[in-house]
Image: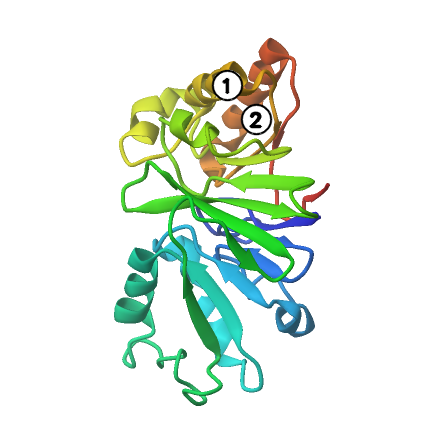
Amino acid sequence: MKIRFLGAHMFESKETRLSCILIDGVMAVDAGALTSALSFKEQEAVEYVLLTHGHYDHIRDLPTFALRNENRTVTVVATSFTLELLTTHWLNGTVYPDLTRRPSAKNPALRLQPIEPFQPLPVGPYEITAIPVNHAIPSVGFKIAAGGGAKTIFFTGDTGPGLDPCWKHVNPQVLIVDTAFSNRAQMLAAKPGHLCPILLREELLAFRKQKGHFPYVVLTHLNPEMEPEIREESRALAVELGIKIQPAYEGLEVIL
């Protein structure tokens, strides 16, 4: 399993892109950088898109990505809540065409696949499980397993404190976790549903309490203006816990 970070930040600039990872070149998780980070040829290889929630920075590139799908159908997997946001606010025939019925109802650019929390869903060569997380709107993280479960990651999407219930359902080799803010913004992080290194510490300790070990941790959805602090604080946390914590960046590749 090859994980490529197309976007690793919560704000976009010349140097930073919005939330999006690409797995094995065929499955995207969130769509904040689905077109801006990929060539047309790379876009044409994407067969599945998982959406953690309906905030703009996580779905932004999906409509323009799909507009080029004249001869193929891409499967979009999300909760019913997120799919409804997508169809009523974006693919509504006004902001963007209804790409679930274009070019034709029989062969649409996008096929919407609802996923129920905690119920594993086969998607291509992967098994996907949606796990609810704490955020400003209903959101899920995705457990993504390949090779019969031999290779597993958990992508939290945007999340605040309170991941302990999630750990009952996941035991990933790689944990990709929202760490949007530095410790000085702890209250700002927690209220809308984000983490900072000091809050992440408690979530990782809860993970170890349940599993007896730590996963390999990759931080994503970083606030660029706080990134130097996040990196420094995460280095200190890694030393304290004796683990590897990797802040993500555009172009980072993690291979399982």
Q: Is residue 39 left or right of residue 90?
A: right
The residue indicated by pointer 1 is 210
Vertical placement of 201 versus 108: above or below?
above
Which of 143 and 250 lies nearest the eye of the viewer?
143
Residue at image position (62%, 35%) is 174
Q: Tell me if residue 70 can be seen.
A: yes
Give how far across and how far down residue 125 sits, in percent. Answer: 65, 58
Q: Tell me if residue 61 can be seen.
A: no
Q: Amino acid at mark 1?
A: Gln
Farthest residue toward the top?
240
Residue at image position (65%, 13%) is 242
Q: Amino acid at mark 2?
A: Arg
Disc 1/disc 2 C-alpha distance (Å): 26 Å
Vertical placement of 15 versus 201: above or below?
below
In the image, which is nearer the foreground, mark 1 or mark 2?
1
Of the residues under marks 1 and 2, which one precedes in the sequence?
1
The residue indicated by pointer 2 is 231
Query: What is the tally of numbered marks visible in this picture?
Result: 2
Split into 4 quadrants, where in the image is the C terminus? top right
Q: Residues within 10 Å of mark 2 (few under 14, many from 20)?
A: some
Residue 42 position by quadrant: bottom right
